[in-house]
Image (spheres, rainbow, N blue to C red):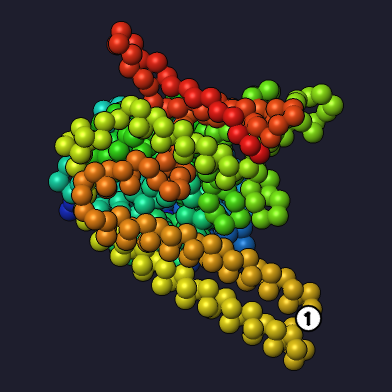
Amino acid sequence: MKAAIYCRLSEEDRDKRHEGDDSASIQNQKSMLLQYAMEQGWEIFQIYSDDDYAGSDRRRPGFQRLLRDAEQRKFDVVLCKTQSRFTRELELVEKYIHGLFPLWGIRFISIVDNADTANKGNKKSRQINGLVNEWYLEDMSENIRSVLTNRRQNGFHIGSFALYGYRKDPEHKGRLLIDEEAAVVVREVFTLYSQGCGKTAIARLLNERGIPNPTEYKRLCGLRYRQPKGRGGTLWKYSAISSMLVNEIYIGNMVQGKYGSLSYKTRQNRPRPREEWIIVEGTHEPIIDRKLWDRVQSLIKQKAKPFAGGSIGLFAGKARCMNCGYTLCSTVSRGRHYLQCPNRHVAKDACAGAFISVDRLEQLVREELNRLTAEYLDLTVLEQEVTFCDDLREQKGRLLSDLILWEKKKAEYGKAIRELYLDKARGLLSESDYREMSEDFNTSRERLAHRIADGKRKLSEMEEFRETDGTRRERIEQSLYPQRLSRGFVDALVNYILIGKRIPGSRDVPGEIHWNFFALPMNGTQAPITTYLSSEV
């Protein structure tokens, strides 16, 4: 007779591993089973072994190989130290030991608890052992769950790996420390989004600069991180940026328990509703300050859709129709951007409509802002109290390196388009393939051209700010009265803007700007500032 020996050692046995403890060593299990097989005069077909696997894990590699070979009738006996080493699940005891093994002509024997399928009289004892092992699994699962929940509620990090931007404290278990190299990227992602850059555009920017994504960064740091199925690759993607921007761990809150297992018998997890998450505030040092976090969450709620170049519109989510309250949508005509009410085309008399050019609205907002600045701010006081950060070297250096990289990429796209044309002329490429590929390259090149132009404008602004005459008043005025508005500037200062329909008989468009700041009258009561405007289309 041929015997297959199966041995298993689980994580729970680690504390038992010492010399003289037979139950704690794979080697001791093998020796015991080999001696028993030799005493019976059986030939050893193969020794199957699983180290650091629980008895409830059905995916054990050695266990799966044993079952495949058993189905092919490669041996006559399965020999284990105890029935629980084979499995702790009563379902598998019934399926294999009492069901399929007899059909395949295979005998199951466990030495210590005297389980033997050749002995018809001990079937009930095998079932009782299976039931006891099942209870053990359930109790152990509940105990582990209780311990983990308690540690989560006390603000300890219990994951195998720290979130990107942090590292595990080697001296204090369950504590997170900032990983400054990754934290720089996290801060840049939040800053870019707050300035109106879309999630896909941010991912593309990081990829073009060769920054490894969180998974690749773990691998480069020597961590044994297993990538979930279907999430391969080393590039940043929309989903990675999206999940980063809403993760409260970056503001110092420990957020855990987002997923829960379906059962102790499976490793499958399901997402839990937010009210079931365990959130403990202020457990570690934040990477993102609260103001930036709140600004980003506000932008996310607006769900503004970026343009083709990757930037979010200057007034996206801010401009609304004065008549129906709908958020104005962007439209392009002859190269100019306009905002109009989408509700006016839904049905007849659905809305009177609203329409204004983005450039004109920007001019009006800037003029109103300048007027309010002159009315409410005292430049003499600001000149005495404002402190400037004179070191723009780091920002300028990063922008210059990005511009060099973008110019290089743009030239590569141009070269690729020329090579595609030559391949088409030689008959190596079909017309449809050429058209499809060249369109993709042209789109990417145009996107880079927009980014380069925007980068050069920012660089010029940095130079102007730095090369100013130097007086504090001039620098304050330059900051308070910008030549162009940025998305971050609008988001910080403007709550929302109402735009109405053009006044009949004129080219004026009524509007209201509801600001994010307050006036403080003589009685000390804060009052939100609203300004009213009338504009030519």
Say which of 65 and 485 sits in front: 485
At which x and y percent is residue 344? 76, 31
Residue at image mark 1: 430
Q: Which residue in the rendered view is the most extreme toward the bottom? A: 426
Give the answer, above or below, for where 408 lies relative to 266: below
Among the 4 quarters of the image, the one containing residue 512: top right
Residue 86 in view, yes or no: no
Say which of 167 and 483 sits in front: 483
- In the rendered image, the quadrant that contains the C terminus is top right
Say which of 443 and 95 sits in front: 443
Q: Residue at x 74, y 29 (%)?
A: 505
Among the 4 quarters of the image, the one containing residue 455: bottom left
Q: In the image, 254: left or right of 314?
A: left
Q: In the image, 119: left or right of 342?
A: left
Q: Residue at x 56, y 63 (%)?
A: 447
Q: Residue at x 58, y 82 (%)?
A: 415
Say which of 194 and 466 sits in front: 466
At which x and y percent is residue 138? 42, 30
Q: Which residue in the rendered view is the most extreme toward the front? A: 505
Q: Residue at x 47, y 73 (%)?
A: 407
At which x and y percent is residue 46? 46, 66
Give the answer, above or below, for where 375 lies relative to 120: above
At which x and y percent is residue 219? 36, 62
Give the answer, above or below, for where 357 lies relative to 26: above
Total marks drawn? 1
Residue 384 in view, yes or no: yes
Badge 1 density bin: few <14, some 14–19, many ≥20, Cα 10 Å: few
Q: In the image, 56: left or right of 67?
A: left
- Give the amino acid at mark 1: Ser
Secondary structure category for the residue under label 1 = loop
